[in-house]
Image: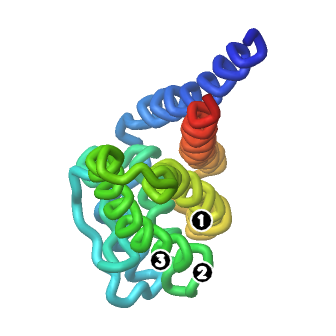
Amino acid sequence: MGILIVLFIVLFILTTLPSLWTKAILNKHRTPHPYIPGTGLQFAEHLIQKHELTGVKVEETEQGDHYDPIEKVVRISTANAHSNSLTAITTVAHEIGHALQDKYDYPELKQRTALIERAAIMQKFAGMALMITPLLIPLAHTPMVALLTFGAGFIAMGVPVIIHLSTLPVEFDASFKRALPLLEQGEYLNKKDHKTAKRILFACAMTYVAASLSSLFNLWKWLKALKR
């Protein structure tokens, strides 16, 4: 029992602290930068033109920074869209990194996009199955009902694990193989700011690691509850 408590504390720390640290890093570098001339939106438009990302648009959003490979849109949060902070510029470079992955048919991005689309359908049916199984139990005392419940639960808990794990290589590639070289080769930042941008990207990457650990932890707890 003691080992389980220690394991729970360790996993809690690993899944919570990275998010808190990332927020602290991003907030620390949200102040306006004295030498960066444009906002996040302007920087995104500049990079789209420079790297000939044909068909890619940029727009402001309230849903958080992300690249939509289906709509071909780089969406920049309001906080970063109208700011020239290091956080804003680095975040935009990361999202443009995803657009570059799309342009050059990065296999892992395509696989993740297809997986997310399939997962949405699977989780919808899993949710429906979990809703109807309590109604089926009194009517049909068969192993099929238990199997249906297990299958639906496994999809609901297991699919997020697969998605988060498939996200890791995509995010690390967008940050360290695309965004960082993009910032360095374009000479948008000085040497000191480039180091800060690297730290911002690393902090953000840790949130994806934490999300993967969290989803694995949730799956482990669910499987352990089934054994009781």
| Sooner in the amino-acid sequence: mark 3 or mark 1 | 3
Amino acid at pointer 1: Val
| Sooner in the amino-acid sequence: mark 2 or mark 1 | 2
| Category of crowding for the residue at label 3, using alpha-carbon neighbours closer than 10 angstroms: few (below 14), some (14–19), many (at least 20) | few
Q: Which mark is residue 170?
A: 1
Q: Quadrant of residue 73?
A: bottom left
Disc 2 target residue:
106
Q: Quadrant of residue 56?
A: bottom left
Q: Which mark is residue 36?
A: none
Q: Where in the figure is residue 83, as x and y percent of width and height?
A: 30, 47
| Sooner in the amino-acid sequence: mark 2 or mark 3 | 2
Amino acid at pointer 3: Ala
Q: Is residue 118 visible?
A: yes
Label 3, label 1: how far apart the Cα atoms are: 13 Å
Question: How is colour applied across the structure in the image?
Answer: rainbow
Vertically, is 179 above or below 204? Answer: below
149 or 3, which is in the foreground? 149
Q: Are marks 2 and 1 in contact (CB under 8 Å)?
A: yes
Q: Residue at x 61, y 68 (%)?
A: 178
Label 2, label 3: how far apart the Cα atoms are: 13 Å
Q: Where in the figure is residue 123, as x and y percent of width and height?
A: 38, 60
Q: Is residue 101 visible?
A: no
Amino acid at pointer 2: Tyr
Vertically, is 199 above or below 75? Answer: above
Q: Residue at x 32, y 61 (%)?
A: 124
Disc 3 target residue:
114
Q: Quadrant of residue 107?
A: bottom right
Q: Residue at x 60, y 63 (%)?
A: 166
Q: Where in the figure is residue 75, as x and y percent of width and height?
A: 30, 63
98 or 111, which is in the foreground? 111
197 or 206, which is in the foreground? 206
